[in-house]
Image (cartoon, rainbow, N blue to C red):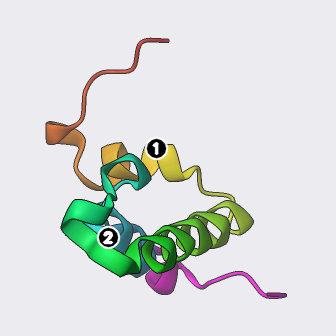
Amino acid sequence: MSDKLDEDSLQALKIAFTYMPKAVEVNSYEYGERVDKILAEIEFVRSVLLFNDTDPDEVEGEINPDSSPNSSY
């Protein structure tokens, strides 16, 4: 990956990321044999967000500020 995403693409990725399961929620009971693939996809999206100077842990609050908890710091 050599180029950063344009603003519209980055916004689309942020929105999609908010609908992805969190890594701690991925288990074999719900996802069966796809667990490793899903975890790899989540990590890939996180890495693209980081590459684009976006903290994946802050995306939910940015996209849905009314439903995210207040920061503790």
Identify the secondary structure beneath mark 1: helix
* Magenta residues, start to end: 1-10
* Quadrant into which the N terminus falls: bottom right
As drawn, the residue found furthest toward the top would be 73
As drawn, the residue found furthest toward the right would be 2
Q: Residue 49 carries which label?
A: none
Residue at (32, 70) in percent of width and height: 15
**Would you say the magenta stretch is mainly helix, strand or loop?**
loop
Dot placed on the residue nearer the N-terminal end, 2 or 1: 2
Q: Residue 15 carries which label?
A: 2
Q: Identify the image quadrant of residue 31.
A: bottom left
Q: Nearer the viewer, residue 65 or 56?
A: 56
Residue at (31, 67) in percent of width and height: 20
Q: Label 1 is placed on what type of residue? A: Glu
- Asked if residue 15 lies left or right of residue 47, the reply is left
Q: Identify the image quadrant of residue 67.
A: top left
**Residue occupied by mark 1:** 58
As drawn, the residue found furthest toward the left would be 66
Q: Label 2 is placed on what type of residue? A: Ile
Is residue 2 inside the magenta stretch?
Answer: yes
Distance from label 2 to label 1 (Cα)? 12 Å
The percent position of residue 64, horizontal first and vertical second, equals: 22, 50
Is residue 7 inside the magenta stretch?
Answer: yes
Q: Is residue 53 above or below residue 64?
A: below
The percent position of residue 30, horizontal first and vertical second, equals: 20, 66
Neighbours of disc 2 within 10 Å: few (<14), some (14-19), many (20+)? some
Q: Which of 40 and 5 is in front in this view?
A: 40
Identify the secondary structure beneath mark 2: helix
Q: Which of 69 and 28 is in front in this view?
A: 28
